[in-house]
Image: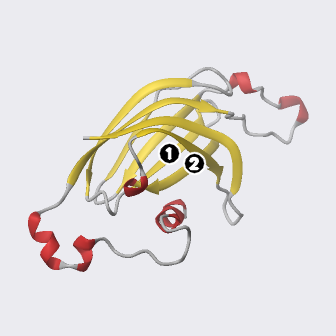
Amino acid sequence: MQLNAARFAQNGNAGYVLKPEILRKPAAAKGGLEISKLKIQLVHGFQLNAPKSNNRMSRRRDRDLSPIVEVEVVGLKTLLLASASAKGGELPEWNDTFEFDVSMPDIALVRFNVFDDKTKESLGAYALPVSSLLPGFRRIPLNKYKPFAVVENTPASLFINVSFA
């Protein structure tokens, strides 16, 4: 569901996304596949809150979080890299760098998934097309996805630096 929503967010959820030129015109495919190198530096996170517990006595404090970020590129091939666990509660710092060789960036999507290392509970996720990423420092908002429920927007976000080679 996240990847489907990411594909259509490209045009403001208007309901129609034009196929990339390589899929519409066979002549465009004669040049071979376009491969670009995507480099994402994960700087830090903001307002990552511990999952809420129904039991009042067992509520965890934000300082107990050990968030891990998975960065996944879905395209012709699916590539997945994960960060090391970070301490810092609501404001963890990673300074990890992920490098991907992306085939056909026009159809590839990148997904960020943040979860707690101890409980394996999701703290938030976000997906977007690689073609929508611009070079430079970017804030990636994190949403909570629940089965059969509306997407819950949260104040949590990741701060990243994107570059293409």
Q: Position of residue 137 (x, y in %)?
A: 47, 36
Residue at (34, 75) in percent of width and height: 19
Q: Amino acid at mark 1?
A: Phe
| Looking at the image, residue 144 lies above or below residue 82 | below
Q: Position of residue 120 (x, y in %)?
A: 60, 38
Q: Which mark is residue 134?
A: none
Q: Which residue is mark 2?
A: 125
Closest to the observer, 47 or 137: 137
Which quarter of the image is occupied by the C terminus?
top left
Q: Are marks 2 and 1 in contact (CB under 8 Å)?
A: yes
Q: Amino acid at mark 2?
A: Ala
| Looking at the image, residue 109 lies above or below residue 47 | below
What SS does tag 1 mark? strand
Which quarter of the image is occupied by the N terminus?
bottom right
Q: Position of residue 132 (x, y in %)?
A: 42, 55
Closest to the observer, 70 or 105: 105
Q: Which residue is mark 1?
A: 112
Residue at (55, 75) in percent of width and height: 14
